[in-house]
Structure formats: C-alpha cells, structure tokens
Amino acid sequence: MRRVTNCLLIIVLAFGLAGCDSRTDRTDGGGVLLSVSDFDGLPILVGVNSTLSAGGLLQIESLTIQNIAKNPTGTTSDLMNVEIQSYEVQYSRADRGTRVPTPFVRGIFGVIPVDGTLDYDNLPIMSSDQFNQEPLSDLEYSNGGFDSETGESKIVMNFSVRFFGRTLSGDTVDTAPIFFTIEFIP
C-alpha cells in the first residue's frame, strides 16, 4: 500500500511540476499575436545633411500591424483588442563600424481589433537626436563628411523595429522585430 501511495505522489508531483511552466504567463499575450504585416516607402539611401536641413526626421511611409487570434476557430471578444503603447527602433552596423546612435523609443497610440489591422502613415524611425550623434554626425559637412571610425564616406546601418501593446484584458503583447538596412551618405 505504501508503494502505491508513493507512486501516486510521484505522479501527482510530476504533473504539478509540468503545469508550472514559468513561460506561460509571459507568452500568453491574451490569446492574440501581433505582426507587422506590411510596410512601404522605406528609404534605402539617406543624405544626412539634406535630412537635417529638412528637420532631421526619417520616416516609413506606411506600416500595418495585424492582431491575430491564436486560435482562429475559437471564441474571440473585445477584450482581445490591443492598445498599442510604444515602439522601439534599435540600430546596428552593417559595415565594419561599431558605433551606433541611441535607440529611438516613442510612445504611440492605436487600437487594433482582434483579427483586424491598424495602419500608421509617416512613422518616424529616426530623429535629429540620432542624426546629431556619432557616427551619423561625422557625415555632416561641418564634421568632414566621413565616418571617423572607418574612414568611409558612407555608413550602412541595420534597423530593428518592434511594437509593444496590451490587450484590453491587461495582457502584454509585442511584435517580432522587423529588420531592414539603410545606407547613409553626407
């Protein structure tokens, strides 16, 4: 009898530990997934001096985020709608340089209904704050017009953009990052 009781306790303990997956609360996302489903009007070559003289704002012409129910045949509700709260752009070098501007983080608002989309037009991905930092500030004519780290008259950077939000029921959700590359010249 004692052996049966011990076996039952071991089985109950095993099921209990299996049910305590610490990732569950972080990956649930309120039953929805966010995805950047489309973007257009992405610059591929940017003149630093002309951009600064025009206000120093680099933008994506249009971007669409989609709110997808994890279980497409299940029941959905308005509590699965997502309020977008912010987005972040991080930079890395695609050339032999190592210096990058600080990340561009901005609060933003929009509500994406479950199984719906939200469009943003002229979404900023870099401001004069980033243009006025090394390495991009090196490309200004007043600073010589070349990257002082690499000696090149161009800088090639990778961009990573990610959006963050919360379902109306309070669960956090974010998009996977989207990636693209832009070449900067004086």
Image (cartoon, rainbow, N blue to C red):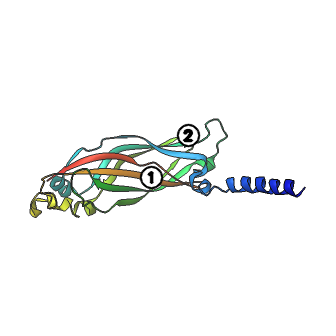
Q: Secondary structure at mark 1?
A: strand
Residue 70 percent coordinates (x, y): 59, 42
Front position in the image: 148 or 2: 2
| Left or right: where 15 falls relative to 173 | right
Residue found at the very far right of the displayed protein: 1
Which of disc 2 and disc 1 is earlier in sequence? 2
Label 1 is placed on what type of residue? Phe
Front position in the image: 67 or 174: 174
Front position in the image: 11 or 183: 11
Residue 42 percent coordinates (x, y): 29, 43
Q: Which residue is mark 1?
A: 163
Residue found at the very far top of the displayed protein: 73
Identified at 68% across, 53% down, the residue is 18
Identified at 11% across, 63% down, the residue is 143
Identified at 47% across, 49% down, the residue is 175
Give the quadrant of residue 2.
Answer: bottom right
| Left or right: where 179 falls relative to 111 | left
Residue 46 percent coordinates (x, y): 20, 49
Q: Secondary structure at mark 2?
A: loop
Q: Which residue is mark 2?
A: 115
Asked if the residues shown at circle 1 and circle 2 are in contact, with their CB atoms under 8 angstroms apart, the answer is no
Residue 89 percent coordinates (x, y): 36, 55
Label 2 is placed on what type of residue? Asp
